[in-house]
Image (cartoon, coloured by chain):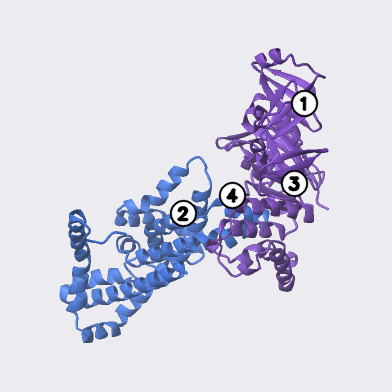
Chain colours: A blue, B purple
Amino acid sequence: MKSLFANRMHTMFAVLGLLLVLFITWPLLRTVLASPPALLWQTLLDEEVRSSIWLTFYASLIATVIGFFLGVPLAYLLARTDFPGKRLVEGIVDLPVVVPHSAAGIALLMVFGRRTLLGRTFSLVGIKFVSAVPGIVIAMLFVSLSHLVNAAREGFETVPPRLERVARTLGASPWTAFWRVAFPLAWRSILSGIILMWARGLSEFGAVVILAYHPTVAPVLLWERFGSYGLQYARPVATLILLICLTTFVTLRIVAGRRGRK
Amino acid sequence: MSGGVQVRDLSVDLGEFHLREITLDVASGEYMVILGPTGGGKTVLLETIAGLHGPRRGQVLMNEEDATTTPPEGRGIGFVYQDYALFPHLNVADNIAFGLTQRRGRRREARAVVQQRVNEMEQLLSIEHLLHRSPSTLSGGEQQRVALARALIVKPRLLLLDEPLSALDPSTREDLQRELARLHRTLGTTTIHVTHNFEEAVALGDRIAVLNAGRIVQVGLPDEIFRKPASEFVARFVGVRNILQGDLLPGNGGYKLLSLDGIQIAVVTELTGRVRASIRPEDIFIFQELRRSSVRNTFRGRIAEIADRGTLLYVTVHLPPDLTCVITRRSLEELELAVGQEVSIGFKASAIHVF
């Protein structure tokens, strides 16, 4: 590994990179530092703020759990098998990243709306999507699943198929070979996919706001405060959300990194 | 006692690999070596016998029962790859125990039993000191011993070895080659060993099957393969070689004496005991009369066979043993050689490769 300022080109690149890093950190720092701790504490006591943050966290968690159970098997197939239309499936998995998220919200409304087939079927068992937690969950699921599927696929691709073959010859069924060999070896990638998916779900605004303005998730609450009361009142909420998200994200990254190095 | 394996008319297509009409009988307890160039489909054949790939046609019989559709976990095999394929997330002990600990329910062995079997394996392969290490910290030879222990702990009816020595440095390779021979003597497990290395094939194989471009082109005793290649390909791939087996006796002047069939051949080697040796036909000279020369080894024998291969002729001289040498048509005519005639042959001690 060369040092950062080994030659002129490196110095130049370092300056350009620094601009980008500042571009990310400067506004975030400004926001965080603009609100005095007392004001933050007051904001935290606001029942509406607390419940929206809690809702955001657990809706995204549910979305991630669903994404895990449906996405990891798909990721494994994409890494291990060849089938006609594989490229198409890979493209479809990436689609949520490229469509505008408000458009994704509209599209989900067309399928899970009150008067649609799925909407009515689910309402029979008491699940409704529009203006309800399940709507928030599917919106988060839609926009964030690509991250988990792709990370898991890359993880499985780094596991030599021979290891599973050896496990099979030693008497393991395909299931056992998966759980005892492929999954643990791909776990680090899968975990980083889980973290990314969860974080992406937390921060979703566009798709969620179209399916469910209420109950209010944190990004929507922030938008509402900004629209109704202006920057002054929106800022402490923004600060609080940023702090909580950053702390969680950094903690998870550290924990995941440590596990991986072991 | 472990069971034999029959492969009947097997055809497999896998990516760019194609196996065609493979028929191979491996007797119970036999050590069969499949010899062939890299990329000839040897690994695919082993993996098909293991049940990891489904054949397009043909059958695999184990213990005289059709196992063609049996999944790999039901075949009772042990598989060792060239790159060892140890599980990187498990330590050595857990790697070895995998075949016992992955079982569920009633088939699962008690912990004490697992521990005992692991102990047996570590003693069998002299790897006691490695048990708590991670596979990534082991040398190639150590990793291959662990891979062998992992394969053998389930008491396989059939052991499949895919180029098990090819990734090792020469001295480790020799160690492990002896280890494989010893394991086979001790356990008597039916073994199919795939390699591109002819010395390995001769040293270990009860019989050798030569595989090229997805077909078995010759099956026979090592000696037959090298002395009587069935095709141009076999002759060129293995080279026509004389393979000898005998005991090394101390000699003088830097030589040792290889004793077999009542003759003694001067050789140069560090090895001792029972060994094999090879000499290429082009390194053996034929004379009408016995005469003095710098050549260490001269013997008299009778011409048993003259095989015509175009410009070159292979002349087999019966001493005993039979040694085949190559001469040009012109030499044949000048020396007026004929079957049954008595001649002298000679070769340098350094032309003999002992292994």
Q: Nearer the viewer, mark 2 or mark 1?
A: 1
Same-subunit check for callouts 4 and 1? yes
Q: Mark 2 lies on which chain?
A: A
Q: Do labels 3 and 2 share a chain?
A: no
| Residue occupied by mark 2 | A153
Comparing labels 4 and 1, the label whose residue is closer to the camera = 1
The lab-note entry on whether marks 4 and 2 share a chain reads no
The label on residue B317 is 1
The residue that label 4 is drawn on is B170
Tell me the kind of residue under disc 4: Pro
Q: In this view, does A198 lie above or below B10?
A: below
* Measured Cα–Cα span from mark 4 to mark 1: 34 Å
Q: Residue at x 43, y 59 (%)?
A: A148
Measuring from the top left, give residue A139's x and y in whole percent: 38, 61
Evaluate if marks 4 and 1 touch, with contact meaning CB atoms under 8 Å apart.
no
- Amino acid type of the residue tagged 2 in the rendering: Arg
Q: In which quarter of the image is residue B154?
A: bottom right
Q: Which residue is drawn at 81% across and 43% down?
A: B27
Residue assigned mark 3: B248
The answer to which of B322 and B197 lies nearer the viewer is B322
Q: Which of marks 3 and 2 is in front?
A: 3
Name the element at disc 2: helix
Circle 1 — which element? strand
Residue at (41%, 65%) from the top-left corner?
Answer: A137
Q: For mark 3, name the chain.
A: B
Please identify the quadrant where the N terminus of chain A is shown.
bottom left
